[in-house]
Image (cartoon, rainbow, N blue to C red):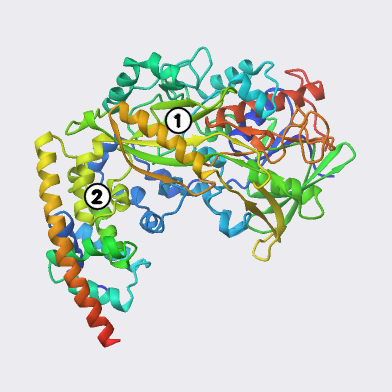
Amino acid sequence: MFTPNEPDILSRYLLKVKIGTRESQLYVSGIRGGGFELTAFEAQLFQHMLLSPIFCAAYDTILSIVDPQNQVRKRLYLMLSILETSPDHANLFLGVHGRWACIRIACVGASKYIFYLLLGSLLYGLQLSKYRLCH
Amino acid sequence: MSLIYDCIVVGSGPSGVQAAQTLVEGGMQVAMLDVGVHQDQFYQEQSPNTDFTQLRKSDQNQHLYLLGKDMESIHKDWKGQHDRLTPPLAFTKKLVEEWQTKSPNQQAFMESLAKGGLGNAWGRGAFTYSDKELKAIGLSTHRWPQFYQKIAKRIGVSGTKGIGLDLDQLMPPLLLDKNMQCLFQRYKRYSKRWKKKGLYMERTPLAVQNQPDVERLSEQYWDVDFWSLQKSAGYHPGHTLKKLLPQNNFSYLPQHYVYEFQEIGDKVKVLAKHVQSKEDKVFYCRRLVLCASVFGTARIVLNSLSQSPRKIPLLCNAFTYGVWLNTKMFGRQNSLKRSSFSQLSVYEREDEQEHFNLLNLYTYRSLLLSKLIRELPFSFRFSYQLSAIVKEMLVIGGLHLPEKAHAHNFMQLIPSKTSPLGKSLDIHYQHDAAKTKAVLARMNRAMFRWQAVPVLSRPKAIGSSKHYAGTFPFAEWPQTFQLAASGRLHFTQNIYIGDASGFRFLPAKGPTLTIMANAHRIAKEILKSQKINFGQPLKSEG
């Protein structure tokens, strides 16, 4: 399963950046290379996730706790690795310097993490119930 | 009759090439039998040729070698595979699964059929063993400084004299980056007190050239050592093999998987399978030197001499890695000039025998940040933010523990339906997990005093240290499946073992330099037994 806006949404969630055709093509060829197949439940989650980067954050947060080896997260990992090996985005991976910048990023990141954890638990619970009803 | 070589060396790893060089210099007609999987042409051409940070900002094709041409590193990371090989070095493990030399449940025990063997994946730690350690291994200390010095001259060793390295005429140590400088300074401030407690911090001795020579670059601090064999100043066996190839009395015979030998009178018949055609090939020699790594050598010896499954001992260092945050580096940028190899080593004296536990320390740059993000238990976005903050503070440590032989650690060659040879090695191994935990706790306490906060530790799968030994230990009195001091297998006339199979004890310090020095020593023994003088080559029989 592959949707054309997938690389764009995932990169907007991961780094808040817009990607070019190079990254998009690499992502597509990575997925087509195999090893990223989704189960029915994973596909349902993934479809919902692609509605918005906020949903991506919520599902990724909850999945990192309940099922870190989920194939949905493997797709996110693929996108993250592609972004890291792109010269346009390499700077974002070379470390943050400055004490106040570090403190600010950590505090904002942690508070958002808690918010997404709560949202993710709610959405994941709903999706799980929906899946159980249908199957 | 086919050509009879004076000596056949099996394997092209660190021990094989050093034994071959000594024999070739001694005038013997030497053949090296090796499977010899070589690095993909593709990765050779894609080798990064500039500073790691620079190439990250400019190279449009970096994904080809950082992630692999088929994104293989993504799949490997996701499965949490043990080998830690980057895509350009993955050839080190190629074909091993196809030949099914070990039971599938023990894949963390790494074997290599590559040209250069496990030497391609070597962290370049070049430690010397103390007299007590050499005695515990079963080696006489006589002339060992000379053997070490000889190998150090051949491969180029940089470092400072101390517990880890006791050699003269060394190249100066590599530069320390800021992160490691902070740690080292904090240790040095109270070094006397730490030494009283049995803790020593030293520069890690490395087989890395710090001065250029004709064939090799000096260290450029490009930090691409784990991505490129060509652009690294670190030694690997390919360097010696390259020197040997033009010699008239040396033949390199790749694509041969040796599986058996037979002694016929004063000659040795060596049986091998051609890797592609699977045809049987026969070679003859006067002396056979097995340097096929501990597993390769065990497979050949057991297949040749043992009719029924026989248990042989095995040694392997316990290996755990830990992650610390150097608080002094918070918000600071680390030096740009860095090497990928270990920069500092912490030795902890274990007992009166002067056996040490060893913690090798690295900083984190030449690996992708996504590998670290993958390890954290948070969402990718939050993990990315945290990793970017702590990246320059990270201190990664590999903890190795010394290992003695235990009855419950052994392997045997058993019939196997999946192996093309019909037999594979079945390994049984356990470590003392409580001991590892206790040593790590002590190291954590010391690191904390040096203002490095412990954040994570993971015991790695058994076998992932890649340090193996002890399968055919040195024995003073002749016993089957044991070695004489000369490296000759007892109850054989002309079979020598040049790798770590003879070590009765495995110190925590990386064994590679000692393995090479021992192979050189054994080659000298062979030359002595043949009464060959330098410059008087033997004529081979046709």
Residue B216 appears anywhere in the view: no
B245 versus B258 height, above or below = above
Judge left or right: residue A99 versus residue B503.
left
In the picture as drawn, the residue positioned furthest to the bottom comes out as A134
The residue type indicated by label 1 comes to Gly
Q: Subunit of mark 1?
A: B
Chain letter of the residue carrying label 2: A
- Determine the residue positioned at 25% across, 48% down: B60
Dot 2 amino acid type: Glu
Where residue B468 appears, x then y in whole percent?
A: 60, 40
B204 and B346: which is toward the camera:
B346
Location of residue B251 (image quadrant): top right
Q: Nearer the viewer, residue B402 or B13?
A: B402
Q: Are the residues flagged by discs 1 and 2 in contact, CB closer than 8 Å?
A: no
Characterize the local packing of mark 1: few (<14), some (14-19) or many (20 or more) Cα atoms within 10 angstroms: many
Q: Is residue B13 left or right of residue B259?
A: left
Disc 1 secondary structure class: loop
Q: Is residue B172 above or below residue B506?
A: above
Q: Which mark is residue A84?
A: 2
Q: Secondary structure at mark 2?
A: helix
Up/down of B377 relative to A52, above or below: above
Furthest residue toward right: B265
Q: Which residue is pictured at 51% across the width and 39% down the height? A: B435
Q: Is residue A27 left or right of residue B93?
A: left
Q: Residue B194: x percent and y percent? A: 40, 19
Residue A76 higher or lower than B472, as above or below = below
Structural distance between the alpha carbons of marks 1 and 2: 27 Å
x, y percent for residue B200: 43, 21
| Badge 2: residue crowd in 10 Å (few <14, some 14–19, many ≥20) | many
Q: Which residue is mark 1?
A: B234
